[in-house]
Amino acid sequence: MLELRGVEVGYGRVPVLKGISLELPEGQIVTLIGSNGAGKTTTLKTITGILRPHAGTILFDGRPINGISPVEAVSRGIALVPEGRRIFASLSVQENLRMGAFSRADRKQAWMRQLDGMFELFPHLAQRRHQLGGTLSGGEQQMLAIARALMSNPRLLLLDEPSMGLAPLLVEQIFAIIRDLNRRGATVLLVEQNARMALSVASVGYVMEIGSIVLHDTARRLLDNPQVQAAYLGI
Amino acid sequence: MRPRFTYGGELFLWRWLRLTMANRYVISPFAIITMLAALLLPLLLDPFGFLILFLDNILVFVLLTLGLQLILGYAGILNLGHAAFFGLGAYTSAILTKTLGVPFPLAFLASTLMGLLGGLLMCPIIRLRDVYFAMASFAFGIVAYVVFSEWRELTNGHIGIRAIPPARLAGIDFTSSLNFYYLVLPCVIVLYLVFRLLLISPFGTSLNAIRQSELAARSVGMHLAAIKVKTILIGAAAAGAAGSLITHLQGFVSPELFNWPQSITLVTMMVIGGIGSFPGAIIGTFAIQFMSEYLRFLVEYKMLIYGGVLVFFMIFLPKGIAGVVRALVVAALERRSAR
Amino acid sequence: MLLGQIVYGLVIGSIYSLIAIGFSMVFQAIGLLNFAHQEFMMLGGLIGYTLAVTLNLPAPLVVLLAGLGAGCIAVAIEKVGISPIRHRGGAEINLIIATIGWGIILSNAAMLTWDAYPLGYPQRFQGKPLNLGGISIVPQNLVILGAGILLMILLQLFFKRTWTGQSMRAAAEDSPTAALMGIDTDRTVSWTFFISGALGGIAGVFVSSIFYASFEMGLIGLRCFAAAVLGGFGNIVGAMFGGLILGIIETLGATYISSAYKDVIAYGIVIVILLIRPTGIFAARRTGLT
Ligand SMILES: Nc1ncnc2c1ncn2[C@@H]1O[C@H](COP(=O)(O)OP(=O)(O)O)[C@@H](O)[C@H]1O
Ligand SMILES: [Mg+2]
């Protein structure tokens, strides 16, 4: 569904991604792991059009989408749950969700229906629907960020470190949700520092180090890979 | 054979210029040429003509913009109330010399101190962040203006103070424009040299660090507030001195000269000249003053054109005239060193 | 007497509110101190004069069209001379100077178009004074107060209910994230300028119908900057109340202290508020302190 071929990106003149390639088959969870500063967020920013690649191609459904704007990306069905959640603090939970549906052509009729669906999926949010986004706890904000991305009814969901800063129990919950979403048909690209959890839900994993993909295998085999174990699993 | 004026293969003058730009020398060859030219310029002009009076006026404003450049261009403080210090100095000098008969040198010093005091008054708002400081300093300037125009017992209100005695120093009378020129020019040169010296001192190093990144400067533990306070005090004192000079140049003061549009004009001069460059401040002052004077033939279209020039610069030349010159010089230097 | 003063203060204050909201909206959306904003009010007043006198249109239509005209001019300026600077990553000071340049252009273009004389609105805008429980009130003042409050309520509904209004709030808070939702942030900025210009233009018609219209009347609007700070710059509800409070303080101050010190009061408040409560007196968001 999504394919990156030799993508190079940088901030200004500073190169960050040095020609990365990865492939994301429809209906699967693929994870991208790597230590802090490796370039994972930069990869997601490039896919969603926030950054423009200097070289290489990004194919979505076989068509190149290099240099599209974020607005175009979401209307084509790519939704990003950004690093640090980025909830609109001064908007209520419901308003945050409504904004998630902004890109849909049928938003006027569809958003309420979609909203009910989200509240079913995240009953916690239903109780808080009129509360301001800024007053939610970290876990609730992460749920809201995921729900907000789902409001656009995306075909591809990109998640940037959804477990960051959450208590272990909440992390479990978030990953259960991701697995559940995938079972309902969502294609997911999951960026994580929590490699063990990420590899346990994903089918395929990519390992990134300072701007390059250094390893790429099924999640199963990566979990057993001694290099990965030493560097990312703390074994 | 190599030319004689070289230094490690590099032409001596170029090396000098490059190191001045890197704040290693106080003064560049071009600054020296400019100063000499400025000293000799009146020989070419009609001593009773308009131009020399006009130059006197511009040089007083250069004192203001140099100080503001230190505050805005180097410490990054968006001061929209600089004319308040100017006014404080002007009224101090006017009242002291006219009402109390104090001699000019003392009044000049007192004006400088009053400017400094004005700077101290502005200090409480220094802890405000960028745009918030801009709003507060704008308000500060308006409050000062209202004091100038409404404290009638002291300032004679909107009518202002007239018939102020001319500046006298060591038996010389500075009534004539020509004489006054040689009073204000040394002030400008001294201030310029002092500021250049400041820049190569440790204080200047911290200023440059702040200009590059306030966040980084704070994270290495620089005491930002203290540095900012110092720049405001220095700039305000210079503005106070300028106020004294303008009073004696014009022979009268009235509050309109120190209202908020004046503060804005000063900022405009710096931005057109080039933020973060002392020569830029001087160029900008000349550019704006000449523009306001020599666009007069456009009559009612003058201000329209003036506004248009501001917008044009901000869109196409945001670094000002000095920015353009600097880019050209840097390109030339790079081409030379590449050879 | 006092009650009459307060009512008059509220009338002036509601006009101030309309202008202060514009200052606040633009600041909230793009962090800009818009020194051209008061000129949208001036343009509204003068456009309104032409509509009322030359075209002899009815008052409600004059208000509407003048607002529309000022709003469109605001958007044009944003597109031509503000956003291009922002997109090139221009510094704050460059943006401020650009708005100052636009302010000069607008007021001088207005002088060339409408001449330099004050232009009074026709008598039909004022109406005959009414006597309400002992207070004599010009009906025009009541209409202005009512219309001002109505506009502010409509604006709140716009921000709360509509897609565009809500997307403007989202984009003002976090523009990159709003773009991820598919919100065109260039458009929300243009909408912000349109609404702020239109409210300013309507306020201009109100001011001119009480006093007169002139190319210099922007100076009145500049004072609303103080009202915006009072309400916590960037806080729209705060700006509404800031305007009302400033109107009352000014009217009472002029009667009981001196009208000469009007600006000292207004701008003294600015400094004090920024120092002790930069979020304004109504809210607890955003801080101006380092
Ligand atoms: N806005 C930026 N400007 C310049 N460099 C950046 C910026 N954002 C990230 N970088 C640099 O790009 C590299 C990759 O960052 P990022 O993609 O955020 O890594 P990750 O998400 O894997 O932790 C880092 O070296 C970081 O310093
Ligand atoms: Mg990251």
Image (cartoon, coloured by chain):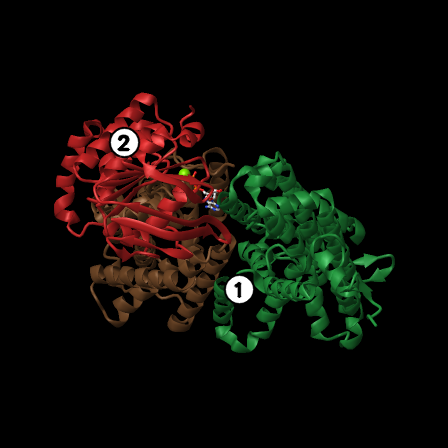
Q: Which residue is mark 1?
A: B317
Image quadrant where one finds the N terminus of chain C: top left
> Disc 1 vs disc 2: which is toward the camera?
2
Q: Residue at x 67, y 53 (%)?
A: B90
Q: Is residue C155 above or below residue B58?
A: above
> Chain A in the picture: what colour?
red
Q: Which residue is mark 2?
A: A201
Q: In this rendering, does residue B103 appear at all?
A: no
Instruction: Kindly state the secondary structure of the residue where label 2 is placed.
Output: helix
Q: Is residue A120 left or right of residue C217?
A: left
Q: In the rendered image, which quarter is residue B290 located in?
A: bottom right
The chain holding disc 1 is B
> Do marks 1 and 2 share a subunit?
no
Q: Which chain is brown?
A: C
Q: Position of residue B137 (x, y in %)?
A: 54, 46
Q: In the rendered image, which quarter is residue B54 located in?
A: bottom right
Q: Position of residue A55 (x, y in %)?
A: 41, 57
Q: Position of residue C267 (x, y in %)?
A: 48, 44
Hey, what amino acid is under mark 1?
Leu
Q: Position of residue B162 (x, y in %)?
A: 67, 59
